Image (cartoon, rainbow, N blue to C red):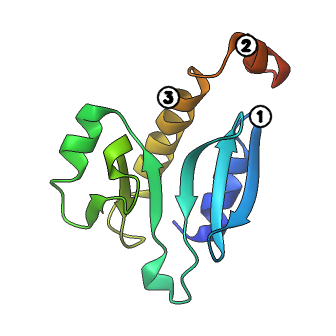
Amino acid sequence: MTRDEFDQFCSSLKGTTHVIQWGGASVWKVGGKIFAIAPLYEAAEYQRISFKCTELSYDILTQQDGIIPAPYLARAKWVQVLKPHDMKDEDIKDYIRTAYDIIKVKLTKALQRELGLLD
């Protein structure tokens, strides 16, 4: 998954916002809370993607080649996919959806309502 594909997918999730921070990282939030990050790297082989995950997913994913505890965020159960082909795009999308859901449900009901996230 390229950074452009990452940004396009994250933008399709309801109520998200996007900022560029930390020296060019593409940071995606819902309700002001981060759920996925793609740091800026020049070379295509270094299109890293980081996302929040469940404790179980964290334990499983960090045992796989090409996936590490995310720098600075591992204590909060974030992982980083090191190269575009270390995980299938559809799997990355599934994990990003889960990260989005993890953060979304922690928002207050009032904020969820304001963002149009309640059905």
Q: Disc 1 marks which residue? A: 15
Q: Position of residue 70 (x, y in %)?
A: 36, 59
Task: Using the image, tell me which numbered label, if any, was put on residue 86.
Answer: none
* Horizontal side of residue 17 vs 2, given as left or right: right
Q: Secondary structure at mark 2?
A: loop
Q: Disc 2 marks which residue? A: 118
Q: Secondary structure at mark 3?
A: helix
**Label 3 environment density (alpha carbons within 10 Å; few <14, some 14–19, many ≥20):** some
Q: Nearer the viewer, residue 32 or 79?
A: 32
Identify residue type, mark 2: Leu
Residue 84 sits in quarter: bottom left
Identify residue type, mark 3: Ile
For image coordinates 46% across by 50% down, the residue present is: 51
Q: Nearer the viewer, residue 110 or 83?
A: 110
Tell me the distance, in whole angstroms, between the alpha carbons under discs 2 and 1: 11 Å
Identify residue type, mark 1: Gly
Task: Using the image, tell me which numbered label, if any, was put on residue 102.
Answer: 3
